Amino acid sequence: MVTYQHPHPAITTDIVIFTIQDGQLKVLLVCRANDPFKDHWALPGGFVEIDEHLEAGALRELKEETGVSGVYLEQLYTFGKPDRDPRERVITVAYYALTPINGLNIRAASDARQIGWFAYAKLPQLAFDHKDIITLAQQRLAAKLSYSTIALQFMPGKFSLSELQQVYEAVQGSPVDKRNFRKRLLAYDCMTDTGEVRRHGKHRPARLYTVKSPGKVEFVK
Amino acid sequence: MVTYQHPHPAITTDIVIFTIQDGQLKVLLVCRANDPFKDHWALPGGFVEIDEHLEAGALRELKEETGVSGVYLEQLYTFGKPDRDPRERVITVAYYALTPINGLNIRAASDARQIGWFAYAKLPQLAFDHKDIITLAQQRLAAKLSYSTIALQFMPGKFSLSELQQVYEAVQGSPVDKRNFRKRLLAYDCMTDTGEVRRHGKHRPARLYTVKSPGKVEFVK
DNA sequence: GCAAAAGTGTTCCAGATACACCCATGT
DNA sequence: ACATGGGTGTATCTGGAACACTTTTGC
């Protein structure tokens, strides 16, 4: 129990985790076990501890609720409408995170909540104002693709240029010219050709690349 | 007195108010009357009330502490390092605001705190992490000038193109080519030529323009 | 040999940049 | 007449957009 002279809002973080699956932009959601919005899908997130950095809180909730860690994380916006939570005044600092397109180790939380990936284009009914948060996150992400190398945060250790192109197409929701795309991305000088190739299906094998500065997002143009 | 099950951080807003004076980018600061950081300069701002929207809180503090109202306001970033305030855990949602280059009605707060405009290039020692906040705000503003019409938020009802050019030069800290500047800005089709001119000094009078959609910021390029 | 994805260059266009002189006024 | 800031046009460069065929593999 804690007592204050004046009322304090509660502070949470919510995290929009994106990935690309089957050429689609997807978001990780958890199913709420309790009221309000019991059995509705919601963003992972929760209350910030009193001595915890905001970003650390976001990473902790992400780990606890979904088992996801080691992701690229960036602050999105702070949502503070007085009535956005029916219980008490809750201000949420929203983050968005990107996880590689392969090898996602998601895991239900210890309290056995359901979790799952949903296509951005086909989201279910969402709790609170989480729809607004996801919409803003997608807009921010799409904008950042065009003036930074943030898309590389979706890539696993080794990847082909076609996979990277799929990231752009999925986030922007429109096709990209293959030749212009390769010319532009290679000109940024942010990837190394490993010399390796990957055989996969009945067609020519793809060259594999690695990111030169993993975890670093640079501005381009 | 209010009691909670778990500790809650306090929430404040801080506002970086920019204007242009004498061709320089300036920031409005208030002198703190109390500890911590007594007699240090700081951003205007303060605690968010429990039923108040974040943006409304920022506007209220701005009015109370500086007399400024009717400004363009945009959320900047949320700063939440656990030790950024020595008294208790305080998370601040930072905003930035733009006020027209003429006719600033600033006014000391009722508690007679000193307030004043400071050149961004020559800031005094600042309280808390306010230096970081101002630095981020200037970066955001400079970036936005290049892909939006946000600079028009600095303009009073009627203004000359030279005044607008001064805004760009002051924020970016570098000179701009007059002919290219006019060509580009007029192509955006965001201003109306009033037909009026302003006589001011011993030289040719300047044409005066008005903003087509005041308060609205559009993306360009 | 056929299906499927990987890989590769050139032409064209639009928007940005560089650049210098005349105009209208006050003193 | 001169000092001061206001106002104007063209040539060039650069980066983005459009566009189609060959290569390598598995079956």
Image: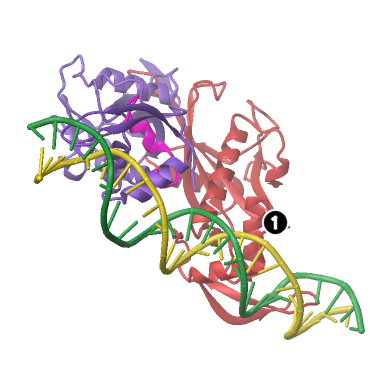
Chain colours: A purple, B red, C yellow, D green
Residue drawn at 63 percent across, 58 percent down: B167
Lateral position of residue A180 relative to residue A212, left or right: left
Residue B137, by quadrant, is: top right
* Residue A22 in picture, x, y percent from top left: 18, 37
Q: On the picture, is A3 further left or further right than A18?
A: right
| Residue A93 image position (x, y, % from top left) | 38, 33
Image height check: is A108 above or below B54? above
The residue lying at 54 percent from left, 72 percent from top is B210
The reply to whether residue A66 is in sight is: yes
Look at mark 1 in the image and give the residue it sits on: B21
**Amino acid of disc 1:** Gln
The chain ID associated with circle 1 is: B
Q: Determine the image quadrant of residue A61.
A: top left
Residue appearing at x 73%, y 42% in the figure = B122
Tell me which segment is drawn in magenta.
A143-159
- Tag 1 secondary structure: strand
Q: Can you say which quadrant of the picture contains the N terminus of chain B?
A: top left
Closer to the camera in the image, B126 or B136:
B136
Residue B164 at x, y percent in the picture:
62, 64
Q: Name the residue: 19% across, 45% down.
A: A121
D23 shown above or below A13:
below
Question: For this view, does A178 lie left or right of residue A185?
Answer: left
Asked if the magenta segment contains residue B160, the reply would be: no
User: Dot 1 surroundings within 10 Å: few (below 14), some, or many (20 or more)?
Assistant: some
> Which of the 4 quarters of the picture holds residue A34?
top left
Q: Position of residue B184 (x, y in %)?
A: 54, 67
Q: Could one spot residue B4 in this view of the protein?
A: no
**Relative to B165, is B150 on the left or the right?**
left
Q: Is residue A150 magenta?
A: yes
